[in-house]
Image (cartoon, grey):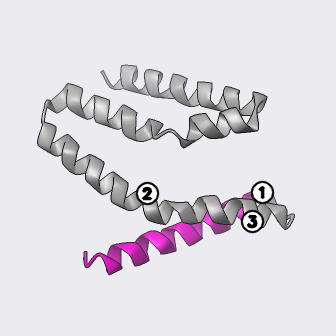
Amino acid sequence: MALLKIFISGIIIWLATEFGKKSGKLGGLILSLPLTTLIALCWLWYETHDASKISSVAKETLIFVIPSFVFFIALPLLLERELNFYLSFIISIVLTLIAYFAFYKIRGET
């Protein structure tokens, strides 16, 4: 079962990447879809049939989408300033991790 999950998930990521090569807008549209969430919720349902667990994961995912915006704001800004891709990518990830940590603390979680 794990290999099937990996295969299907990999195909979806590959398709999104291929569309992204052909059109920035189409690639952006496909990548903006919550593919990871959709795939994970489907696998979770398949394995557990637990609607309350899926509901909980979906709610928490919605909440944690907010700090992830930092990545999508920082990366294009850094790249437009002609920073190296890898440096821009790493800085964006670090800023996003800081945003997640701050968001987690603001929510009162420990």
* Residue 47 relative to residue 91: left or right: left
Residue 70 is tagged as: none
**Disc 1 element:** helix
User: What amino acid is found at the position of numbered circle 3 in the picture?
Assistant: Leu
Vertical relation: 106 (above or below) 86: below
- In primary-sequence order, the first of circles 1 and 2 is 2
Q: Quadrant of residue 2?
A: top left
Vertical relation: 43 (above or below) 110: above
| Residue in view at x 34 percent, y 52 percent | 61
Q: Quadrant of residue 43?
A: top left
Q: Main secondary structure of the magenta part?
A: helix
* Residue 104 relative to residue 46: left or right: right
Quarter of the image with the N terminus is: top left
Separation of marks 1 and 3 at Cα, in angstroms: 11 Å
User: What amino acid is found at the position of numbered circle 2 in the picture?
Assistant: Val
Q: Nearer the viewer, residue 84 or 29?
A: 29
Residue receiving disc 3: 77
Residue 65 is tagged as: 2
- Highlighted magenta segment, given as a residue range: 85-110
**In the image, residue 90 lies in the stretch drawn in magenta:** yes
Q: Nearer the viewer, residue 29 or 71?
A: 29
